[in-house]
């Protein structure tokens, strides 16, 4: 395995030949009757346990890429595989997203009428978990992100950093295999963003596979691997510099 950039990236191939958790092959995505090509022949593999930042300027295709990886959109051509299974052959992408993926967005998307513990339970509503178990799991997850003391507060009673912590807890509700984060610190001040940096570091250190989209070079360099995009294609795919240790 080398660090040389390649359009057909194989950096995600495990040395023990375990299939990558996530693989995309020759993705193309066009919009507006083919006039706009958001992705141009993109191939990428991500191993289980990796922490990957997808970076690039506005319009580079990174958000479109996240939509493909998260089964929020379908490619014009090419294929995405999860644990070796093509997404195009899955019976229900809604079920796949619910069971296998966790999403963290810049704008939190919390329900204002629910408390923090209620918001964390939302992804579990489609499961067969009884109410008492949903409540227990949600409170455990809030504890994991340092929000136990705010479990019964509604979003408008929380700071923006606290809302993002609740959103991360919600993303973990169904024990996903992959966490996808789209500009997770975009609405946060530098101090609060640093807290979210450390939380994502901690989740990765606990074994979570994370793929994040970010403009923030500080957040991007917390990942172990940086994939840079430009004009809908992968420009380079390299290990990130050694990250700083977690703050105390």
Image (cartoon, rainbow, N blue to C red):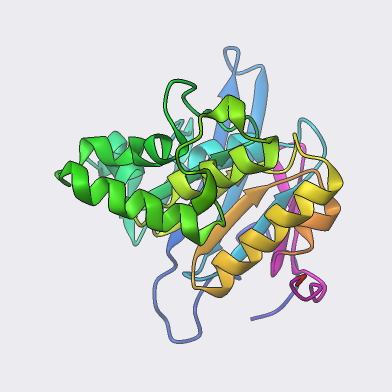
Q: Does the image show residue 58?
A: yes
Q: Quadrant of the C terminus?
A: bottom right
**Residue 30 position (above or below residue 161):** above
User: Please, which residue is most extreme toward the bottom here?
Assistant: 16
**Is residue 139 a member of the stretch shown in magenta?**
no
> Residue at horizontal 44%, vertical 87%?
16
> Residue at horizontal 34%, vertical 35%?
122
Residue 64 located left or right of residue 217 = left
Total count of labels: 0
Q: Which residues are magenta?
A: 223-246
Quadrant in the rendering for residue 11: bottom right
Residue 192 located left or right of residue 150 = right
Q: Percent x, y for residue 24? A: 49, 52
- In depth, the one of 175 and 217 nearer the eye is 175
**Residue 21 position (above or below residue 194):** below
- In depth, the one of 101 and 128 nearer the eye is 128
> Residue at horizontal 45%, vertical 58%?
22
Quadrant in the rendering for residue 246: bottom right
Q: Does the image show residue 92?
A: no
Q: Quadrant of the N terminus?
A: bottom right
**Is residue 231 a member of the stretch shown in magenta?**
yes
Q: Percent x, y for residue 177? A: 39, 60
User: Please, which residue is most extreme toward the top here?
Assistant: 33
- In depth, the one of 101 and 231 nearer the eye is 101
Q: Percent x, y for residue 53? A: 68, 56
> Residue at horizontal 39%, vertical 71%?
19
**Residue 221 position (above or below residue 170):** below
Q: Percent x, y for residue 43? A: 57, 53
């Amino acid at each position: 395995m080398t660090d040389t950039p390649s359009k057909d990236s194989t950096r995600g191939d495990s040395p023990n030949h375990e299939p990558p958790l996530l693989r995309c092959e020759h993705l193309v995505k066009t919009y507006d009757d083919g006039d706009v090509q958001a992705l141009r022949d993109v191939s990428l593999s991500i191993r289980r346990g990796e922490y990957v930042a997808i970076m690039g300027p506005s319009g580079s295709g990174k958000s479109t890429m996240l939509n493909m990886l998260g089964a929020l959109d379908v490619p014009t051509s090419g294929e995405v595989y999860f644990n070796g299974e093509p997404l195009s052959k899955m019976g229900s992408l809604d079920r796949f997203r619910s069971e296998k993926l966790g999403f963290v967005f810049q704008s939190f998307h919390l329900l204002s009428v629910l408390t923090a513990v209620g918001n964390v339970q939302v992804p579990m509503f489609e499961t067969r978990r009884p109410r008492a178990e949903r409540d227990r799991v949600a409170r455990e997850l809030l504890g994991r992100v340092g929000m136990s003391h705010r479990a019964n507060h509604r979003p408008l009673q929380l700071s923006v950093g606290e809302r993002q912590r609740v959103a991360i807890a919600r993303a973990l509700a169904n024990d996903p295999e992959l966490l996808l984060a789209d500009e997770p610190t975009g609405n946060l001040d530098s101090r609060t963003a640093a807290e979210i940096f450390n939380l994502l570091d901690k989740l990765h250190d606990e074994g979570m596979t994370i793929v994040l989209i970010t403009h923030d070079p500080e957040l991007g360099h917390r990942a172990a691997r940086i994939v840079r995009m430009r004009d809908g294609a992968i420009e380079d795919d390299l290990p990130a510099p050694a990250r700083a240790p977690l703050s105390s």
